Image (spheres, helix red, strand yellow):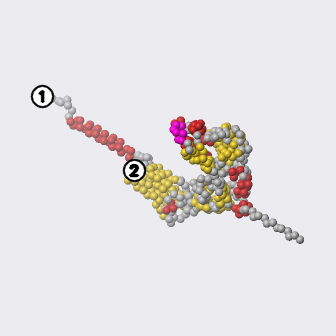
Amino acid sequence: MSVFKSDTPSRSNWAIPSLLLIIIAGLLGGAYYLWPRFEWEPPQITLIPDVDVLGVAPMEIVVSDQGAGLKSVTATLTSGGAEHTLASEQYAEPVSEKKITVVLSSKLTGVKEGPAVLRVSARDRSLWNSFRGNETVIQRNVTIDITPPTLELVADDRYVNFGGVGVIVYKASADTAMSGVRIGDYFFPGYAGQIKGHPDHFLVLFAHPYNVPADAKATLVATDKAGNARETRLVYELKNVKYRKSTLSISDNFIQSKMAPLLNDAGARQGTPQEVFVRVNKGLRKENEDKIAAITKQSTPSMLWKGAFTQLSNSKVEANFADARTYTYNNETIDHAYHLGYDLSVTKQYPVEAANSGTVTFAGDLGIYGNAVILDHGLGLFTLYGHLSSIDVKAGDAIKQRQILGKTGETGLAVGDHLHYGVYLHGIAILPVEWWDQKWINDNIQPKLEGQSGVAIAKFQAPKAPRKTVRKRRR
């Protein structure tokens, strides 16, 4: 009987390698799927503000995890042996970032001032660490402070021009982190070390802006590191300053020759004359004014000027501050804007003098204001010189009063050769004329710098009663 050996492998010989391949593929597939779930990067925690003192101000806890996502966040405050829960959140689905605002004033009931421990923990949904996930814990020794700083008004102003400046002196407690005057959307910070004989007193120049309602109230405020605030309402009589209203008719020639070239984007120059005008008068104007505001909010914390500011010599005022302008095209109103300075004219390319001593903080092209120079005079006070035909100074230069900055011209939106002169205080345009008045400075600023009390200044500024005439009896 013959025995034949088959060349075909038995099924059992094929089954074992196939099964191994299936198992390996399954393991690799499972590892590929599960591996990201085993990431070991812990969550990130950020506290805003990141301070060592807590008060009534809100605190924001920002937690993020770019891996498996957040699973839970907990924040507690331990004080006097008692633990207070500030936040506790669990997430059913992965969360990549979470912002939790904690209003401490509603959480600190019964908590006394003094030392405490702040603890914030965040855990992600990773399978790492025996399926418990990664955890980040921040623990800080903090101080609870819920007492606001103190304020003492030393000298104020009885009268403030609408659109003009008031000057006050005050004293704030040592824990004060920020102080100054707030009115509307504007804030004017105070400066220490300016008052003769009183290094702990603060001086603040503040405006009652032209674009803030006359019935708005200015408030002296002080805030400490913990966010506790103290406020004192300022009382003064607002002197009415009547600002002009004018209507200007815009021509095609003005739009094409003066306005369109100011647009750097060639595409923006296309469109109807009205569209081009609005792009410049509204869009570019806002861009320029935002830049001026940013520049004039960064001031030297000391006085760089002395005495009254000077008007451009031999000049005539052609346009006024806060002139509310209405622009018409073909007898239709197309836009509105405020003129935030004085237009001063003499002769063509007349030398432009610095109104007072200071530092050049900007020199260059400023859109609708053309070639311009901005001087920082300290304590938040700035002057702007626009439409120049040439500039003779550069940023950083120290300038003396009446030093030549350049020459008048017709750059920007100037119609005819003149100087646009503006005065700014912490980003807001203010009434220039009072700074030309030595008496106003003598009455409102100088006595406060010399450390005179508010009572003495009030007596000095009080209207003088007419003297009685004593008639001699005839004999």
Q: Amino acid at mark 2?
A: Pro
N-term mark: 1 or 2: 1
* Residue 132: percent from left, percent from top: 39, 52
User: Which residue: 44% across, 50% down?
Assistant: 97
Q: Secondary structure at mark 2?
A: strand
Q: Which mark is residue 192?
A: none
* Residue 308: percent from left, percent from top: 72, 50
Q: Is residue 270 magenta?
A: yes
Depth check: 96 or 403 in front? 403
User: Which residue: 65% across, 57% down?
Assistant: 240
Q: Secondary structure at mark 1?
A: loop
User: Which residue: 25% across, 38% down?
Assistant: 16
Q: Which residues are magenta?
A: 268-275
User: Which residue: 43% across, 49% down?
Assistant: 96
Q: Is residue 340 magenta?
A: no
Which residue of the protein is positioned furthest toward the front in this rendering? 331
Q: Quadrant of the N terminus?
A: top left
Q: Which mark is residue 94?
A: 2
Q: Quadrant of the C terminus?
A: bottom right
Residue 461 shown left or right of residue 94 in the figure: right
Figure label count: 2
Label 1 neighbourhood size at 10 Å, few (<14), some (14-19), many (20+)? few
Residue 49 shown left or right of residue 465 in the figure: left
Q: Nearer the viewer, mark 1 or mark 2?
A: 2
Residue 380 seen in the current view: no
| Residue at mark 1 | 2
Q: Amino acid at mark 1?
A: Ser
Depth check: 464 or 275 in front? 275
Depth check: 145 or 441 in front? 441
* Residue 147: percent from left, percent from top: 57, 63
